[in-house]
Image (tube, rainbow, N blue to C red):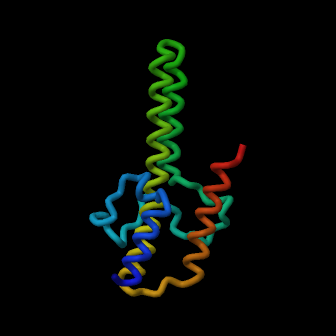
Amino acid sequence: MNEEYKEKEEQKKSGLTTADLAGVDERTSPKGASPAGVASSLATEEQATPLLSPEEAKDFRARWDAIQVGFVDEPRRAVEQADSLVAGAMQRLAEMFADERAKLEGQWDRGDNVSTEELRLALRRYRSFFGRLLSV
């Protein structure tokens, strides 16, 4: 059993990944895929980097506004739609992080050396997202 296989098995045992949340099958997902709408440079200051593209954010906001307007006439339906919208936004975020992870893993699988700087920037993006998740 080679070291790479052992490492991947350990990762599977250690818990949930963004690919798991996004429902991505790592065996069939494109290894070099770049997620649509992800900021082109991770070097941008992490607090200023939006999680979604401006177009995606605008779409989510418009859908939220429509849900709020609909609350007056159909409150139960509005809450169901809100749940669906939030679930969709969470799914999209998980897909973005899974795509970034797949890109890094694709480089590793090809034997490419991923620079410490690239890894640092990826970790900063995770840290920024995690901090936003935990903010009140």
Among all residues in the image, which is located at the extreme right? 136
Please tell me which residue is depicted at 49% across the width and 63% down the height of the picture. Answer: 14
Q: Nearer the viewer, residue 47 or 99?
A: 99
Q: Residue at x 64, y 60 (%)?
A: 128
Decide: is 12 above or below 70: below
Where, quadrant-wise, is the C terminus in this rendering? Answer: top right
**Residue found at the far top of this picture:** 73
Residue at coordinates 35% horizontally, 71% vertically from top-left?
31
Quarter holding the N terminus is bottom left
Q: How many marks?
A: 0
Residue 98 image position (x, y, % from top left): 44, 61
Residue 16 lies, with reference to residue 102, above or below; the image says above
Q: Position of residue 59 (x, y in %)?
A: 47, 41
For residue 51, side relative to residue 94 (left or right): right
Does residue 7 appear to the left or right of 26 in the view shown? right
Percent of width and height locating residue 8 = 41, 72
In front here: 39 or 84?
84
Quadrant of res 49: bottom right
- Residue 119 lies, in percent from the top left, at 56, 76
Tell me which residue sits at (47%, 87%) in the image: 113
Most extreme residue toward the left is: 28
